[in-house]
Image (cartoon, helix red, strand yellow):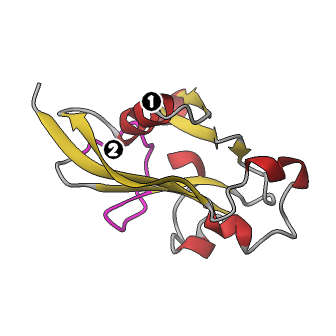
């Protein structure tokens, strides 16, 4: 299979601006700078999804990740990364993904990657409004 490359990052900077909502029991897993996985170029293969790349890189870097298959959307839903879960920073908080500046309105395992794609996994504390994704949905799911 042909090796392709994309860029991946995982951040939770929005939590730093919403500490009043944050579950303080989780303080030790919150990176001081809000960066869990610094932006870097990673390899993927034709036919792989945003989910495939996230899973492989988190495993490779020993970063905790929890997800569940959601049959109704035929996609994986990301519940937690680095032990930071949906609802850890308020009832509107959770993980969202953005590709090339766009928040897809479908699941992360249905987004097939292209050469050069820029994937960002971003923790939101306000259903995406605090990170520029008004209409996006938590966990990369419709």
Residue on which disc 1 sits: 60
- Left/right placement of residue 134 relative to residue 84 reads left
Q: Is residue 69 left or right of residue 16?
A: left
Instruction: Report whether 9 appears left or right of 43.
Output: right
Q: Callout 1: few (<14), some (14-19), or many (20+) C-alpha neighbours within 10 Å?
A: few
What residue did someone put label 2 on? Answer: 111
Q: Is residue 15 left or right of residue 137?
A: right
Q: Position of residue 140 (x, y in %)?
A: 50, 48
Q: Which residue is nearer to you in this view: 50 or 35? A: 35
Quadrant hosting residue 127: bottom right
Query: Which percent across, then down, holds residue 61?
Result: 49, 35
Q: Mark 1 or mark 2, which has the lower sequence index?
A: 1
Q: Is residue 84 above or below residue 21?
A: above
Residue drawn 51% across the image and 69% down it = 133
Quarter of the image with the N terminus in it: top left
Q: Is 45 within the magenta?
A: no
| Number of numbered labels in the structure image | 2
Name the secondary structure under disc 1: helix
- Badge 2 element: loop
- Main SS, magenta region, reads loop
Q: Which residue sits at x=55%, y=31%? A: 62
């Amino acid at each position: 299979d042909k090796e392709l490359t994309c860029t991946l990052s995982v951040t939770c900077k929005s939590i730093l601006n919403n500490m009043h909502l944050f579950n303080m029991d989780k303080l030790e897993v919150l990176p001081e700078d809000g960066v869990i996985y610094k932006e870097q170029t990673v390899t993927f293969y034709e036919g792989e999804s945003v989910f495939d790349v996230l899973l492989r890189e988190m495993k490779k870097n020993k970063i905790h990740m929890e997800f569940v298959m959601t049959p109704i959307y035929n996609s994986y839903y990301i519940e937690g990364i680095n032990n930071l879960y949906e609802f850890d920073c308020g009832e509107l908080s959770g993980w969202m993904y953005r590709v090339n500046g766009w928040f897809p309105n479908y699941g992360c395992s249905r987004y097939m990657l292209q050469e050069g794609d820029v994937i960002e996994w971003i923790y939101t504390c306000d259903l995406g409004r605090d990170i520029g994704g008004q209409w996006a949905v938590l966990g990369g799911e419709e």
